[in-house]
Amino acid sequence: SILLLEFYKMAVERTLSIVKPDAVAKNVIGKIYSRFEEAGLKIVAARMLQLSRADAEGFYAVHKDRPFFKDLVEFMISGPVMVQVLEGENAIAKNRELMGATDPKKADKGTIRADFADSIDANAVHGSDAPETAAVEIAYFFPSMQVCAR
Ligand code: IDP
């Protein structure tokens, strides 16, 4: 029924994911995409791009007063990134779980950061941390017409 369909759709979320320059340089985009797909997350939008300094500063504006902000921006513009929208049940938390802790040394075994990241700076992936930030971050990279229904 339509009611049941609406209920089901409520549990489906979208989250913004970035394969950062270190992981793009290591040629592991496909391996990281496999983690998403094996966990039941669908890629509903994707683009590769070289961020400008302004792009990176805007994206990480919430961190602008943190001591690591300048290094973070330098790193994010050091090479191309792969940006995607992931869709699925509980997508935001599920992606955070797949990513592992910010510091790869503290990330659980089998997580993306444990397997592909070298340091807290070069930590392979970004993932939105809440529904509100997911909405803002998705809109930062993708006009709604570029996100597909799947
Ligand atoms: P998250 O990416 O796990 O959500 P945040 O705390 O939102 O982590 O920080 C954003 C990014 O800033 C991290 O992914 C990491 O690249 C960088 N970062 C966070 N904390 C530090 C730090 O203490 N030193 C250097 N870089 C950091």
Image (cartoon, rainbow, N blue to C red):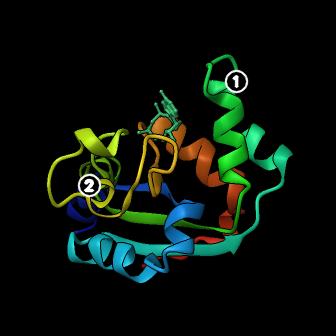
Q: Nearer the viewer, residue 93 or 119?
A: 119
Q: Is residue 85 above or below residue 10?
A: below
Q: At 62% across and 26% down in the image, what residue appears?
A: 63
Residue 114, label in figure: 2
Q: Residues within 10 Å of mark 1 (few under 14, many from 20)?
A: some
Q: Quadrant of the N terminus?
A: bottom left
Query: Residue 87, image x and y in percent?
Result: 39, 65
Q: Nearer the viewer, residue 58 or 11?
A: 58
Q: Is residue 99 above or below residue 50?
A: above
Q: Earlier in the sequence, mark 1 or mark 2?
A: 1
Q: Secondary structure at mark 1?
A: loop
Q: At 50% across and 50% down in the image, what residue appears?
A: 122
The image quarter containing residue 110 is bottom left
Query: Residue 93, image x and y in percent?
Result: 28, 46
Q: Secondary structure at mark 2?
A: helix
Q: Residues within 10 Å of mark 2 (few under 14, many from 20)?
A: many
Q: Nearer the viewer, residue 19 or 142?
A: 19
Q: At 42% across and 46% down in the image, what residue appears?
A: 119
Whether residue 49 sits left or right of residue 40 in the image: it is: right
Mark 2 and ligand 1: say if the CB distance to the nearest ligand atom is below 8 Å. no
Look at the image and tell me whether residue 60 can be seen. no
Residue 64, label in figure: 1
Q: Quadrant of the C terminus?
A: bottom left
Q: Is residue 22 above or below residue 120?
A: below
Q: Nearer the viewer, residue 33 or 13?
A: 33
Look at the image and tell me whether residue 32 can be seen. yes
Query: Residue 78, image x and y in percent?
Result: 71, 58
> What amino acid type is highlighted by mark number 1?
Lys
> What amino acid type is highlighted by mark number 2?
Ala
